[in-house]
């Protein structure tokens, strides 16, 4: 039983002050803000009047991002959903169904024009006028356009709503696309939070950023927040020292695997994948794929199903370093050091591309 001063009120619910402050400190860290901002976050989040209305839309997907969201703790889903934001429509967790559900959606759009946030999950089929996804009497394409056009912001959670995901993998029979591309709406209101699924800490941090600054965070050229996608997995990987020393897992179960060496030769795409997985981890900081012994699949990169496969082979020969590629250099020199040099060059090439010509995009702040 907690004492009165150990509890903080979040609108309809009380949460342990200690857990709530922990959440605020962690969110400040994810956003790259000084720890002193945790108090500001606490103040803003507890202001009931600032709860932004949220409409959560499901399109062609596996509901993995909702799963990710409802597994959030500290604060738990009840606190997040009902107190930090006002979820007016969410097909998975809402009470109304059928006509009543459609009315909730229409009312929410009508009453909050220009003020509500859409959280979109799943790709939108566009071929044959979008008939491959129908919800009620409307296609997913019609619904996406209708709901997103008057939104203040659209947060595309997961790789499918951001870039099309597995539905858009070649030959893409339904013409699946990310929500922004499918609707053709102005990109300014879109934020992409890819990942398979996305990390709920990043979507909550994006919403907190909105509560704090009344605008969306700075984005990269693929409209991903820089606080979460500004650096590669490889930049902060705990196995990085083994990469530098040329110590690689050659096959699962070998000595390198048992010693938690680098997974580059097992196909790890960490050097070309921009995401903060190694810093925020998953399942409340329990672990993450590389921590569990599996290489990064590159799931937060555009078209990763086409460009990052086969998953268990080295980095694909798609990053040019002059006339050669990362793999060719590694094979030609045939030493672990060369693997390191080649991958570093690949990263530099990618960073150079992002950091030079596209620098203005990367620094975009909407
Ligand atoms: S290649 Fe993968 S496992 Fe190796 S250091 Fe980089 S991110 Fe970590």
Image: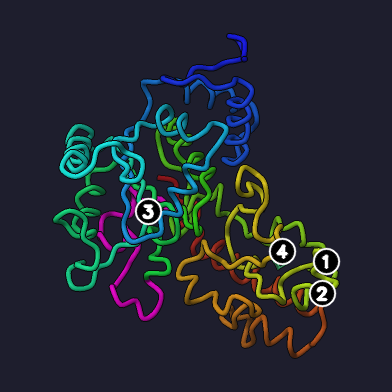
Query: What label does residue 258 carry, if any?
Result: 1
Q: Disc 1 and disc 2: Cα gap in Å?
A: 6 Å
Residue that carries the numbered disc 4 in the rendered image: 293
Q: Quadrant of residue 245?
A: bottom right
Answer whether labels 4 and 2 touch (C-beta < 8 Å).
no
Between circles 3 and 2, the one closer to the viewer is 2
**Circle 3 residues within 10 Å: few <14, some 14–19, many ≥20:** many
- Residue at 59%, 28% (x, y): give it: 37
Q: Which residues are magenta?
A: 168-192
Residue 202's spot in the image, x, y percent?
Answer: 52, 45
In the shown orientation, is residue 9 left or right of residue 132? right
Q: Disc 3 and disc 2: Cα gap in Å?
A: 39 Å
**Farthest residue, direction bottom:** 332
Residue that carries the numbered disc 3 in the rendered image: 121
- Residue at 75%, 77% (x, y): give it: 251
Query: What label does residue 205 carry, if any?
Result: none
Going from N to C along the chain, the mark reached first, 4 or 3, is: 3
- Residue at 74%, 83% (x, y): give it: 330
Answer with the quadrant where ligand 1 appears in the image: bottom right
Answer whether labels 4 and 1 touch (C-beta < 8 Å).
no
Tell me the quadrant of the picture where the C terminus can be found: top left
**Circle 4 residues within 10 Å: few <14, some 14–19, many ≥20:** some
In the shown orientation, is residue 215 left or right of residue 356? left
Q: Secondary structure at mark 2?
A: loop
Q: Disc 4 and disc 1: Cα gap in Å?
A: 9 Å
**Circle 1 residues within 10 Å: few <14, some 14–19, many ≥20:** few
Q: Secondary structure at mark 4?
A: loop
Residue 101 within the magenta-colored segment of the rendering: no
């Amino acid at each position: 039983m907690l004492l009165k001063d150990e509890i903080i009120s979040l609108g309809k619910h009380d949460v342990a002050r200690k857990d709530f402050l922990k959440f605020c400190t962690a969110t400040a860290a994810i956003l790259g803000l000084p720890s002193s901002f945790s108090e500001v976050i606490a103040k803003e989040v507890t202001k009931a009047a600032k709860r932004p209305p949220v409409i959560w839309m499901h399109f062609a997907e596996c509901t993995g991002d909702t799963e990710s969201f409802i597994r959030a703790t500290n604060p738990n889903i009840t606190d997040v959903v009902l107190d930090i934001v006002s979820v007016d429509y969410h097909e998975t967790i809402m009470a109304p169904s059928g006509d009543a559900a459609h009315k909730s959606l229409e009312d929410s759009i009508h009453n909050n024009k220009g003020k509500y946030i859409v959280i979109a999950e799943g790709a939108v089929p566009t071929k044959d006028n979008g008939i491959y996804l129908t919800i009620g009497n409307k296609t997913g394409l019609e619904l996406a356009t209708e709901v997103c056009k008057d939104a203040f912001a659209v947060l595309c959670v997961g790789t499918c709503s951001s870039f099309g995901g597995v539905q858009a993998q070649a030959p893409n029979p339904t013409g699946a696309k990310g929500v922004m591309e499918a609707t053709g709406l102005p990109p300014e209101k879109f934020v992409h939070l890819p990942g398979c699924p996305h990390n709920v800490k990043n979507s909550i941090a994006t919403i907190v950023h909105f509560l704090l600054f009344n605008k969306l965070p700075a984005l990269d050229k693929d409209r991903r927040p820089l606080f979460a996608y500004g650096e590669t997995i490889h930049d902060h990987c705990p196995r990085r020292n083994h990469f530098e020393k040329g110590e690689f897992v050659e096959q699962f179960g070998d000595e390198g695997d048992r010693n938690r060496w680098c997974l580059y030769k097992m196909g790890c795409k960490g050097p070309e994948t921009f995401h903060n997985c190694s810093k925020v981890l998953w399942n409340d900081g329990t672990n993450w794929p590389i921590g569990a012994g599996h290489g990064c699949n590159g799931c937060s990169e555009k078209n990763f199903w086409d460009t990052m496969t086969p998953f268990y082979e080295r980095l694909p020969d798609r990053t040019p370093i002059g006339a050669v590629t990362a793999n060719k250099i590694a094979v030609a020199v045939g030493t672990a050091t060369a693997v390191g040099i080649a991958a570093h060059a690949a990263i530099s090439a990618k960073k150079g591309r992002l950091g030079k010509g596209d620098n203005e995009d990367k620094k975009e702040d909407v």
